[in-house]
Image: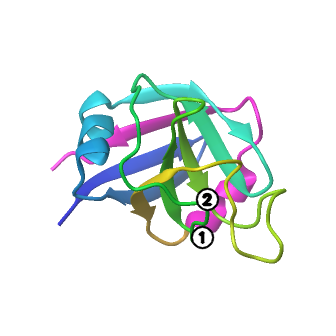
């Protein structure tokens, strides 16, 4: 089982689970993050203190995916189409590596506005 995280903004809380990969582990080890959200369509992204190349690059993701975008050193939360999408499937601005998955209901992320404070932390066991 992967390592669980909480994504919080105001009263909104979304759970996620990090994959069992080297990059996902490095991101998890760097938690917590307290950042300001940027939005791009139905994607929230923010810079994190992890700089890494990606080992498993993809140009398409699924709704609910958590991905690392190396060009911006950002964690990206995909919950619907982006400006690059042709339909409902989220398409990143450029290549990313999927490092985790949000568990429903990630649609709550639609309430998060650009510039809003977001925290990402480990689930305490």
Looking at the image, residue 103 lies above or below residue 59: below
- Percent x, y of residue 10: 61, 40
Q: Which residue is mark 2?
A: 78
Give the secondary structure at mark 2. Answer: strand
Looking at the image, residue 26 lies above or below residue 11: above
| Marks 2 and 1 close (CB-CB < 8 Å) | yes
Q: Nearer the viewer, residue 5 or 124?
A: 5
Name the residue rendered at 27%, 48% in the picture. 123
What separation in Å lies between label 2 and label 1 (alpha carbons)?
5 Å
Q: Nearer the viewer, residue 120 or 59?
A: 59
Magenta span of residues: 106-125
Asked which quadrant contains residue 38, the reply is top right
Name the residue rendered at 67%, 54% in the picture. 92
Looking at the image, residue 102 lies above or below residue 124: below
Colouring style: rainbow
Residue 20 is one of the magenta-drawn residues: no
Looking at the image, residue 74 lies above or below residue 63: above
Q: Nearer the viewer, residue 51 or 111?
A: 51
């Amino acid at each position: 089982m992967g390592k669980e995280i909480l994504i919080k903004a105001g009263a909104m809380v979304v759970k996620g689970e990090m994959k069992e990969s080297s990059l996902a582990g490095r991101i998890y080890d760097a938690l917590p993050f307290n950042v300001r959200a940027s939005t791009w369509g139905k994607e929230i992204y923010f810079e994190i203190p992890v700089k890494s190349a990606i080992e498993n690059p993809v140009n398409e993701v699924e709704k609910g995916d958590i991905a690392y975008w190396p060009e911006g050193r950002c964690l990206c939360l995909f919950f619907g189409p982006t400006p690059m999408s042709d339909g409902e499937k989220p398409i990143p601005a450029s290549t990313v590596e999927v490092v985790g998955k949000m568990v429903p209901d990630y649609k709550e992320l639609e309430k998060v506005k650009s510039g809003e404070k977001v925290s990402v932390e480990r689930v305490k066991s």
